[in-house]
Each structure stands twice: as structure tokens, then as C-alpha cells.
Image (cartoon, rainbow, N blue to C red):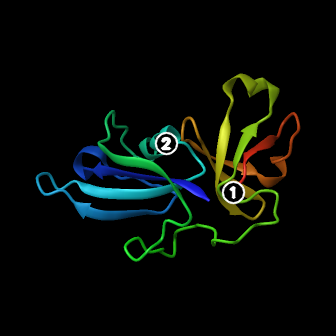
Amino acid sequence: MSYQWISWYHLHEKMGEFELNFPWWESGIRLHDDARTICAAIPNVTDKEAETIVRAAYDRKTKTIEWRFNSIKEGSPFADRFQKAKWMTWPKEHEVSTKPVKLFQVWEDTDPRFAHHGRRVLIAAIDGNSSTCINIKTARKTTVRLDRFKKSSTGYQLVKDWP
């Protein structure tokens, strides 16, 4: 199971609030300006896609984010220092879903009207008959019915499975 381990400095006064649907932690404070050090685990994306998702998580759109690091990791992000909170969603190490749609998969829109966009979504949450998806290019959230995740003219095709 791979994920992007990404960290940046968060200045609340300048950047505002953020909402990230993936595990994240405040790991320290930079003394000279009180910037919070944030670390996050974003599954099944590239480094640039992870940065796009973080940028879009902010209420105020900021042109610059001071990145600390962004690298690919394997396994689970949880450890003594980075403990799992109740709100965090992450599959157990050897948990494999038999459902066709599962958390952190990447799907591509097959609708021919939008084929030129190459829209890919990451499954961030599943609730009943629908899923919360994050567009990998724009990081916009959308809700998609689970029955649309099939290869058809108005559906989606699986691009990357997880784990």
C-alpha cells in the first residue's frame, strides 16, 4: 500500500482553515512565525496530485505553500508519533475488500462527452449507495452513486486499485 507522505508549514492567519479527508497531524511549531508543521498521508496519488489536494483543502486559496517534504511511502502511516484518531480512515494492513468499489481506488470517467478532460477521481468515503470522490486534478469533492462505477458510456473504469 503506497501513499504520499507530505508535510508543509501552515500559517493560520495567512492561509485560513483547511479540511483534508486523509490522515493528518500537527507535528510541531516553527518558532519565528508560529507556523504549524502539518504531516499528511494521501493514498494512491503522485506527489503533484498530493500537492493539488492539499492546496484545494484550504478555504482561502493561497499561491504559495512552503512544502517541507513529499515522498512515497509503503505500508501504514500510523506509529507511536503519528497515532490513528477515530475520524481517520485507512484500511488494515492485510484487509482486502471484495466490493468492486473501495476506499482510495482511482477511477476514470468514461463519459465520451468529457473524455478530453481525462477526469480521475479518488474514492475518499463510501456511505450507503454513494461515494465521496476527490478529483485528482482539481481536488474538488463530488458525490457519485456506486452503481456508476462500471465501464459504460456514463460510468467509470478502475485505474488504480488499493491495496
Q: Tally the marks.
A: 2
Tag 2 residue:
47
Residue type at mark 2: give it.
Answer: Asp
| Residue 162 image label | 1
Of residues 151 and 39, which is closer to you in this image?
Answer: 39
Q: Position of residue 13 (x, y in %)?
A: 23, 49
Left or right: residue 91 compared with residue 158: left
Q: Position of residue 152 (x, y in %)?
A: 88, 38
Q: Earlier in the sequence, mark 1 or mark 2?
A: 2
Q: Residue at x 56, y 64 (%)?
A: 75
Q: Residue at x 68, y 72 (%)?
A: 94
Task: Give the class, few, some or many, for how many residues have Cα within 10 Å of label 1's Cα (few <14, many ≥20).
Answer: some
Relative placement, left or right, of 134 versus 108 is left
Looking at this rendering, what residue extends furthest in the right direction?
A: 152
Point 73% across, 26% down: residue: 114
| Outermost residue toward the top in this view | 116
Picture coordinates of residue 126, whole percent (x, y): 69, 61
Q: Name the secondary structure under disc 1.
A: loop
x then y, percent, for residue 138:
54, 36
- Given the image, on which type of amino acid does mark 1 rest? Trp
The front one of 100 and 127 is: 100
Quadrant of the frame with the C terminus: bottom right
Which image quarter is the N terminus in?
bottom right
> In the image, what residue occupies the spot 44% across and 73% down?
79
Relative depth, front residue between 40 and 87: 40
